[in-house]
Amino acid sequence: MNCIVCVKQVPDTAEVRINPETNTLIREGVPSIINPYDLHAIEAALQVREKVGGKVTVITMGPPQAEDALREAVSMGVDEVRLISDRAFAGSDTWATSYTLSKAVEKLGFDIIFCGKQAIDGDTAQVGPEIAEFLNIPHIAYVKKVEDISASSVKVHRLMDDGYDVVESTVPVLLTVVKEINTPRLPSLKGKMAAKKAVITKMDAQAIGAEQENVGLKGSPTQVKNIFAPQSKVNRKALDGTLEQQVDALIEELRRMKCV
Amino acid sequence: MRIIIRTEKCSGCGECVSSCPFSAIEIKDDKAYINEYCNFCSACLNVCPEGAIVEIAEQGDAKEAADLSSYKGVWAFAEQREGKLAPVALELLGEGRKLADQLKTELSAVLFGAGEHEARELIRWGADNVYHVADPALNRFNDEPYSQLLIRLVRQYKPEIVLAGATAIGRSFVPRVAGKLKTGLTADCTALEIDRDSGNLLQIRPAFGGNIMATILCPDYRPQIATVRPRVMKKGLYDADRNGKILSVPAHGITSGTKVLEVVQESSECMVNLQDAEIIVSGGRGLGDTKGFELVRELAELLGGAVGASRGAVDEGWIPYRHQVGQTGKTVCPKIYIACGISGAVQHLVGMQSSDIIIAINKNAEAPIFNVATYGIVGDVYEVLPMMIRKLKEAKA
C-alpha cells in the first residue's frame, strides 16, 4: 500500500499575538510546527504500513524552510519525503494549493492519501476534499477510526455533527483525519538521527507538471481584500473597588438578571 | 500582480516593516525586502514615505473575464439529515434573502433528499425557488452524489452566489464543487455583505489562527461560494402563505466510490446543553490544568448553566472537544457567558460574542477578551472563582 501524507508547516498559532498599536501580527519568536492534525495523519499512514505493508511518503508545499517539517516526519519513521516548493506557488489560496498538491501526488503515485482535517492557521478544511476532486477519487472527511483496510477497500468511521457514519470506500481514496483517530508516536532516537542525515528532495512546478496559470496568485480565485482587527462593540460596565467588591457587584448584577 | 520594493528609492526607514500583518517585510543591509510570507494584501502600499513600494502587473494578469453577468441569483444549500431540515438551512435562507434583495435577484434553495413538505417549508422561510432532488437515497449524506449534483445544477442555472452550512456535511463536499468549477470558496464566514460598487460578495472571516479578520473576494470567478457556521446568521420571517416554485431535478447518472453503511446518532447531551444553555461558564488556558475545570463546573452548576472551553484548554486535554466554543467548536449565544482564564483569540470570540452579556475573568488586563466583555474582572481565576462560588452558596443558603 502506497500512502502519501500531505502536511503543512504552520506558525504555532497559540503563540501568535497581535500588536495592539499597529494591529499587526507579531510573528517574531513564534515557532513553526507541523500542523497538529497532520501528525495524526502521519500516524494513521504509519499504522496502515504496519498492518498491510507498503511505504509512507510525506509531502509539504511551502517555502524552503518547510524542510524542517519534513525532517520531523522522517524522525517519526516515514520512508520518503518531498518538498513541493517554487516561487511561483506564492500567494496560493485553497484552490491553487489543492491543484498543486494533486499534481505532486499524481506524479508520486498513491493508493491512500492522508491529510489532517484542517490546518490551524487557516481552518478552512478545504484542501483535502479538493485534492480528491482534482484526482477524481473519493474522499472521506473527519475520519475518527479506521475499522478495516484491504488492497481494494477501506471501512472507516466518519465524525458527523450528531454522531458518526460508518463509510466504506474503494481504493484509491483520500482520508482527512481528526484527533480522535490515534495518538501520534514520538520520534525515536534512530529516527532523530535519520532526520538529521536525510536529504530532502525538492520538486518545483515543472517537476510536478503544474500549469503556470493554475498555481500561486494567478491560480487563486480568491483574494484577500483587506485585513482588520476584530472590533469591539460593547457597552462596558465598570466594576470598581477591591476584588471582593467587584465580585459582590457582579453577583448583584446576576441577581438583578434573575440568575441567582 | 506582485508587490515589489524599488530598492533605489528605499531609504531603509522600516516604516513598512510594522505595517505588514504577515511579517513579510524585513530590513537587510539597510534596504527593505519582501520575503515569501507576502500575501499580496496591499497593506504596505501607501505607508512608504519614499513611494518605493509598488504593485506591478505580471504577464497573464489580464485574463479574459468569464462572462460573469450571465450568473444570477443567490442559492442556499438546504442541508437535511435523515429527511429533516437542519436549522442552518433556515439561517442561510435568512441571510440569502437579504443578499438577494440587495442584488434585486431571486433566492433559491437547493435540497437533496427529504420530501415535498420540506421543500415547501423552505419557500415559507424565504426561498423563491427550490431545486429539489427528491431521491430518498440522498437522505444519507454522501460526498460524491452531493457534489456531482450541485456541480450539475450550478453549470445549468448559473447562480452568482452559493451559500452552504459550515457543518460536517458542507465542509466536506463543497470544496469538491469549488475545485471542479474553478471558483473561490471561503470557509466559515462570520459576515457577508455586497460591495456597493462592484456587486461582489464581501466574505468576512477570521484568519491566521483567528488573530485577525479578513475580507475575502472572488472577483473573477462565479459562483462565489461561502460556508457559514450554524447559529452565526439569523433565520428570516416565516410566512405560511408564501408562494414559490419547486423544480424537481432527477438524480440520474450519479456515481460514487463511497457507500454509507450505517448512521449512528449519538445523544450528545452536552452539545445540546451548550447551544441551548442560557448561561455558559467557559474555561481557557489560564486555568492551568484539569483541576481548574472543577471550579468552572461548580460555578456552572450553581448558576444552572453549561460548561464551555476555549481551544487552548481542549488542546491541552483538560476537557473534551465537545465543550469547545469558537471557530472550530460550537457557536453559542447564551444570555450570560462567563469566560474564565480565556484570553480571547478572535477564533474564540466569533463563537460567543453575540452572547447578551459577557463576563471576563483574567489576570492579564490586556487580554482581548476584555474588549468584548460587558463586565471584566482583572484577577486570578483561582481567587475570583472560589470567591464567587462561596458567595453564591451563601446567597442560596
Image: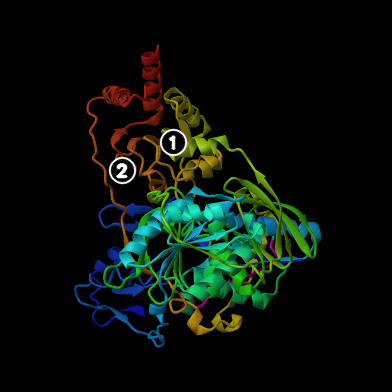
Q: Is residue B191 left or right of residue A108?
A: left
Q: Is residue A50 visible?
A: yes
Mark 2, chain letter? B
Which segment is the magenta one?
A: A78-87
Q: Position of residue B347 (x, y in %)?
A: 42, 50
Mark 1, chain letter? B
Residue located beneath label 2 in the image: B372
Crowdedness near tag 1: few (<14), some (14–19) or many (≥20) residues, C-alpha within 10 Å: many
Residue drawn at point x = 42 percent, y = 72 percent: B36
What's under tag 1, amino acid-wise? Ser
State the image quarter where residue B224 is shown.
bottom left
Residue located beneath label 1 in the image: B282
Residue drawn at point x = 45 percent, y = 40 percent: B285
Q: Quadrant of the N terminus of chain B?
A: bottom left
- In this view, the residue farthest toward the left is B49
State the image quarter where residue B364 is shown.
top left
Q: Quadrant of the C terminus of chain B?
A: top left
Q: Which mark is residue B308?
A: none
User: How many numbered circles are shown?
Assistant: 2
Q: Position of residue A223 (x, y in %)?
A: 39, 71
What secondary structure is marked by label 2? helix
Q: Is residue A28 visible?
A: no
Going from N to C along the chain, the mark reached first, 1 or 2, is 1
Give yes or no for contact between labels 1 and 2 (Cβ–Cβ under 8 Å). Answer: no
Q: Nearer the viewer, residue A85 or A162?
A: A162
What's under tag 2, amino acid-wise? Val
Q: Nearer the viewer, residue B1 or B135?
A: B135
